Image (cartoon, rainbow, N blue to C red):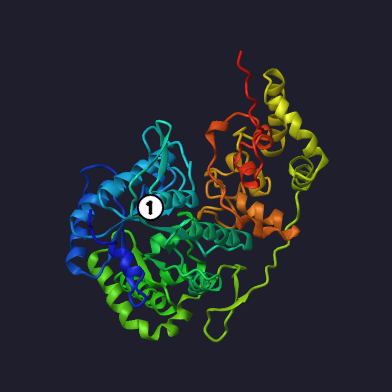
Amino acid sequence: MGERESVLKEKLLDPNAFCITWEQIPGRGAFELQHEEVIDNVAKAAAGGKIDAISVTDNPGGNPALSTEMLCVQIKNAGMEPLAHLACRDKNRSEIESLLCGLAADGVKNILVLTGDYSGSDAFEGLAKPVFDLDPPNVLRLVEKMNEGLEHKAMRKTVKLAATDFFAGACVSPFKKLESELMGQYAKLKKKIEAGAKFIITQVGYDARKYHELLTWLRVNNYNIPVFVNIYVLPYGAGRFMNSNGIPGCVVTDKYLAELAEAKKADDKGKAAMLLKSAKMYALAKGMGCAGAHIGGHGITYEQVEYIIDKGNELAANWESLVKEFDYPQENGFYLFEKDEKTGLNTDVYAQRPSKPSIPFIYRFSRIAHHLLFEEKSAVYKTMKPIAAWLDTTHTPKHIFDFFEHMSKVAMFNCMNCGDCALFDTAYVCPMSQCPKSQRNGPCGGSYDGWCEVYPNEKKCIWVQAYDRLKPYKEEGKITEYTVPPCDWNLWQSSSWLNFYQGRDHTAKRLGIKPPPKKESSKK
């Protein structure tokens, strides 16, 4: 008790400050050289005094690594402020709460909540089972509850736990090519902010206009929230890998890759050009109004980070002149705002949204069925409500109804019979069966050209599909309207229709559909 506020929080909320974090990757194993290098980097950062926090990744690439929370404690003991990444991939909601309690007990206050890469295949005996029980908006909701003092039931009483003091942030990727991809990113960011995100770190990309787009979107929507630019110090090899979508969500265009290839011809293999480019990106971010820089890159040294900071501060006074050096649009890429031809950045005027998606037959049919079955003004709904109440009290008829409901939804939506159906929330694309990460509140950051991170060129991202289904009806804004709670596993393998009519599932609760009153049994 009595510990000072988060240094990161103090710096980020100071409008006159520019905050610096340095990303470290723990690596696999307990006694490996990479761990020693991280600790050595932390010691140099503590001595140098120019870095405000050390950011620690959480199993990047979905493969095992030294635990984030353990390394964060070591960083704190070494005199540096840790920023713990919390990926939703490997943990269910109980484990996430336990992890947060452990971090709080150890005085680690800064967390970055992210969906996480899909599970990698380098785990023991192959691919690890992905979890994705909570998504970032719901983790942020949990963090807010813990900061207020989480309440739970114990011995039939409500117990309120001691409040935590987390300073939580989230991620976004403004570097998406398609209108549907990009609008999904901003829809989910809105939910993250409303759930309690206090700062934003971008995904890796190098287009100045896209960084400015994010800042403009925040300002236009009256969100006063600090943004870190993600400066990944990029050599040619990593750039080539990102250019081919080797690291989900990281965008390196052909134009930038060609520049990296040219720089590689120098005697130092492009190292000086790489560092200068990073310093210019730092200056650009500082000048256009970002609150900080999140610096990372494989094998970069403290001395190189210090160069980026010092050179970036030197260049920041003339940041406008650097915009043209970060002109990396994707081919036919969509921008949310009209271009400002004078600055090369954006105006405050929203761009036209040109996509004209077709409407699949299954969605047309689903809308009709939805209106008949699930809207309270419908005669079919009014008929089904008492039938559902009766079915719910039976055994064999209930199971027959559940079977036919499930089979029809398997045929149309590949239904997994979760019992807490989210088809209403995703324009009738099932997030349980069609999204490998079960994202109910918007897309992860890993899609590429509209394709799913896990199934590129095979499956479209479900949120791209949802946006494209809703847009012809001028309803694409619906994906921003509310945060969908996590799946209620108490309802697993039960009829979602009965759960809806009986007021048990999340949609019924959102719409105010009450469970039928319990009949009092007469005493004999």
Q: Residues within 10 Å of mark 1 (few under 14, many from 20)?
A: some
Label 1: element kind: helix
Image quarter of residue 3: bottom left
User: Which residue: 76% across, 47% down?
Assistant: 367
Image quarter of residue 392: top right
Residue at image mark 1: 147
- In the drawing, does residue 440 fall left or right of residue 294? right
Q: How many marks?
A: 1
**283 over 27 or under it: above or below:** below
Residue 422 seen by the camera: no
Residue 278 seen by the camera: yes
Q: Nearer the viewer, residue 43 or 122?
A: 43
User: Which residue: 61% across, 68% down?
Assistant: 334
The residue type indicated by label 1 comes to Asn
- In the drawing, does residue 247 fall left or right of residue 166? right
Picture coordinates of residue 200 (x, y %)? 43, 63
User: Which residue: 50% across, 74% down?
Assistant: 212
**103 over 403 or under it: above or below:** below
Picture coordinates of residue 447 (x, y %)? 54, 54
- In the displayed orientation, state which residue is furthest to the front: 524
Picture coordinates of residue 407 (x, y %)? 70, 29
Q: Nearer the viewer, residue 301 or 387?
A: 387
User: Which residue: 56% across, 51% down?
Assistant: 483
